Structures are given as C-alpha cells and as structure tokens.
Image: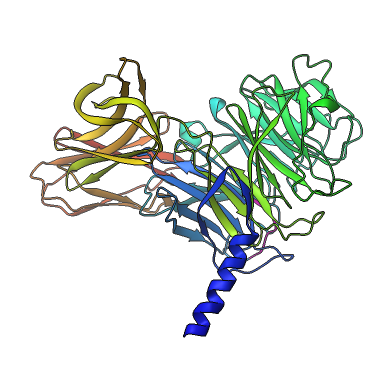
Amino acid sequence: MKNTFILLFLLLSGILQAQMSDNMTLLDTWSDPTLVTHSGLIYNDCWGYTAPDGREYAILGSAEMIHFIDITDPTDVTEVARFDNLNVNGTTGRSLWRDFKTHDEYAYAVADQQTEGLIVFDLSDLPNSVSKVHQSTASFTQAHNIYIDEAKDRIYIPGSDTHGGGIIVFDISPANAAAPVEIGAPNMTGGYSHDIHVRNDTAYCFHGNNNTVKFGVYDFSDAQNPVLLGSMPTYANQGYNHSGWLTEDSQYMIFCDESTGREVKVADLTDLTDITAPASAFFNANLDGDTPLNNIAHNPFVKGDYVYVAYYNEGVQVWDVSDPLNAVLEGYYDTVPSTTAGNFDGVWGVFPYFDSETVIASDTETGLYVLRVNSILPVELTRFTAALNEGKAELNWRTEFEQDNDFFAVEHSTDGNEFKEIGTVKGNGTVSAPIDYAFTHDNPQDGDNYYRLKQTDFDGSFEYSKVRRVRLNSDMQVKVYPTLLAAGESLTVDFSDKSSFDRSYRLVDAAGKTLRSGEISAVETSFTMQTENLPAGVYFAEIQAGNRTLTKRFIIK
C-alpha cells in the first residue's frame, strides 16, 4: 500500500508539474476514460449555457457523444446527461468535430461526419434532464459549424455537405425554436465558408484557402440574397482562414489561421471597402519558444476587453485587447505542455461567457477544463443562483473579492419588470477572499418569481446583478408528455397535486388560435389530449386550475 501511495504521489506530482500556467487557476476537470477515439482524438468542441435560475452548464463533444455537464460549482463539476447513437436512424457513428450553440432554453448541434443533421435539445428541465426534441437531415446531413444571431433569431450553417459553396439559414423565432425552419441557402461570393460570425444580419465569413475572398463581410438582411459589403483577399502571414470573433464595438475582427506558425490577426473593419490586417497588430505568446514559430491558433472568443484563444499546442491564451491594435498577454493555461508543436492535439475550444467569469476549455485528449483568470475577476458577485426548496426560494451568491461593499438588497418581481425590496444582507466591506451569501424568500408567489441583487457601496453607489427566475406551482403539479409526437399520437397530462380546483385545457397552434378545449375534473389524475388530424408543426397545451395556467410546447412531426 505504501509503495502504491508513493507511486501515485509521483505520478500526480508529474502531472501537476507538467501544467504550465500564468494568471489562470484550474478549478476542476471532467473526462471519461471509457470514451472511444476518432483519428486519435476523444473530445472536440465545447460551449456553455446559463439557465434562467443562474445555474451554469458546459456542453462537450466527444467522438460518439454529446455531454451536458453541470459546472455551477466550478470546483465540483458533474455530468447530468449524455447522448449517443446520434445518427438520424439512431445508430452509432463517430465524428471528429461537433459544434454547439444555445439560444433561449435550447441547444443546437451539428457534426461534420456521419448522418446527424441538425439536432435540437430542450434544456428547460435542467438540472434534472435534457431532452432531444428535434433532429432533421432535410437540409443537410453533415456540417462543420453552427452560429446563432441571437438578436435576429437565426441559425447559420457553414460547411455543410449539401451546400458547400454557401450558407444555410434557419429561423428559430419562438414558434420555430424547437423545430428550425430553413429560410435561405444562398451561394457565397467567397464560396465555401469554414466558419461564420454573425451580428444583427451582418455575417463575417472565413473562406479557408479561397484566393479571391479569404475573409468576407456580407449583409444577410435577405437570407436568400446576401450582399458582399467588403472583403480581404490577402494579408501578411496568411494561412487557412479559419475563424474569428468581433470586438464588442464591431470595429475589429480578431481571427485565426489554422496553419502552423501563423500569428493571431486583427482586421480593421472601420472601412469595409478597405479591410486590412496590419502586421503590427499580430500577436502570439509562443509559450514553447520555437524559432520559427510552430504553434497553431484555432479559435478566438472576445468578451469585453479580452480575447480568449484556443491553441492546439499551447492551451488557452487570454489577451487584453482594449486597444485591439496592441494586444497584451493577460494569462494562459496550457493543458498539455508536452504536446508536440505543429500537430493538432491540445485545446480545441473555449467558452468565456458565463456570468460567474468561469472559463471552460476542451482538450482533445484530456477532456473538459474549468478555469478562472485571476486578475480580471469582477468586483461584483461571481455566482448567483435561485432555486425552489419546499415552496421557498433559496438564493445563493458568491463574491471573489469586495471593495467598500456595504450591503446587498434582495429584490423580487412577479413580472420581471417591477421589483420590490424584500430584504437585505450585510456585505463585508473590503476583502480579498471568496465570500458566500444566502437569502431565503419564504413566500414566493404562485407562478414565475424573479430575483435580483442591488449591491450598494458605503458611498451609496450601487449596481444590479443579473435577474434569476424560479417558478412555483403551488396548486397544480402537472407533467405534459411527450414533447415530440408522431402524427395522430395523443398527449398525456399527469397530475400529482391534490388540488380541489376543476381544471380546463386548451390546445393552441403557433399563431395563438384555439383548436380544442374542454374541462378536466379535479378527481382525474391523468388526462389524454387528442391530436388526431393536426398537421405537423408547433403547438401549445394550456392547463388551467384556479388562477394558475401552465403552458407546455410540443411538436407534431
């Protein structure tokens, strides 16, 4: 036993010494040694999701699966769901690349191999479960990437097997969120687009090896007829024009060439008729000290004044780009410093957009990394959650450090607009250590309850937190299923409460028209709602008891 302990200690010491970092802290990791490989790789991309109650989740791709991981406590992460047999016919297949994006309470996924098409997951029941509610190969079977223009409720699909010379566009407005509707599939002036970034109908396309339009900016107001606004056919130190992310003022694009020895570029977009990438603005930390430069920058993500870059060989690098033309290295974390420069092992993707400032990264061989950048933590709280427990709303939050923090006022609303103070929690003045806070609302209202914190300093200045939501169904506990029906299949409504209210129901289409309605006796514990003769589409079941109404979206295939 003693020898085993010594050997384990030496192995762990070697692993810890192998990690190479500066100004970044590893909080936790997740991996599964039983997962299969594809072309020598196990994991691929990652993305993140913050639920309405403030809980945070990572979405991670592996060769055969999609994993959903609860990282609300970033020091103790837990897988909550996984999906395999992802081919449209329900069989197993392996894909080198998977890509994900989230919008409202849905996650959307594509893969560049097999026959998976577009997959939609319903995240509304987290942390209990995730449901796959839609999968279609009508528009494509394979795609390299997916991007969501959240302001316009649109999905953009570049690099598909059916439309390689253009982009496929889907509408995901509320009526179509669970079953996206194709609204355009135009060809592009630059041809094949490897990746895309879209903001308010303006699409920034990365055209790989195209010698005419390496990087193009398009107006997609008309999803079927995009207009080229400007392009950059060539630039210094160019390689395979791969992917990029806009600065928040939309004046600069920070992008990567997926080729060995290329630096990260900054394109000046202030004049779209003359897009340039000045060599003086290129940056790369070169952690291995190779001469000539031998690493590969893969994917950049801009958040505020910082860009988080995923490197195949040199982990996660964080740069201060408050002056985009003069980037300054803020910190880095290399997941596998022993990785040979010039190959495609190491960090694939990064997601830095959690309110808590937690950062996740996916390593192709060692899984999910949960990180934090030490010096750019906000003074305000870094975690804020709301959850129901035995009819009470329990609020929990954490600060990493505080300066002149007098108190937190807890505010409550039933509509998300008008808030009233329901209590205060004393702050800790000025401290540099993490502090956990809690508050319990004993009497939340029936239905939706919204909470926010008003953090107030000694001088009276204040700042609001994000809003969190919990839903209380005090007089009606009901489950409506399934959410994806075949034509003619019935919808089941199960009641688990002991309400004495008589109940009623309505079946409503996406346009709000009532198709069917009726009464449900209070003594019934289960009710079947018929859907025969209804065409394929999105519908809503409304169940009412007393002054409570529950609405559940479902889809008929």
Question: Is residue 11 rendered magenta in the image?
Answer: no
Q: Nearer the viewer, residue 419 or 457?
A: 457
By what rule are the colours in the image chosen? rainbow
In the image, taking residue 158 as reference, residue 378 lies left or right, namely left
Q: Is residue 256 above or below residue 295?
A: above
Residue 116 visible somewhere in the drawing:
no
Query: Residue 165: where, in percent of width, then height?
Result: 81, 38
- Picture quadrant where residue 139 is located: top right
In the image, taking residue 441 as reference, residue 378 lies left or right, namely right
Q: Which residues are magenta?
A: 93-98
The residue most toward the left is 500
Q: How many marks?
A: 0
- Picture quadrant where residue 64 is located: bottom right
In the image, taking residue 19 as reference, residue 402 lies left or right, namely left
In the image, taking residue 344 as reference, residue 532 lies left or right, namely left
- Picture quadrant where residue 503 is located: top left
Q: Is residue 524 above or below residue 324?
A: below
Query: Residue 439: where, in percent of width, then height?
Result: 22, 37
Question: Is residue 94 rendered magenta in the image?
Answer: yes
Query: Residue 408: where, in percent of width, then height?
Result: 27, 27
Q: Nearer the viewer, residue 327 or 183?
A: 327
Q: State the predominant SS element of the stretch in magenta.
A: loop
Residue 90 visible somewhere in the drawing:
yes
Q: Is residue 141 above or below residue 175?
A: below
Query: Residue 150: where, in percent of width, then height?
Result: 54, 30
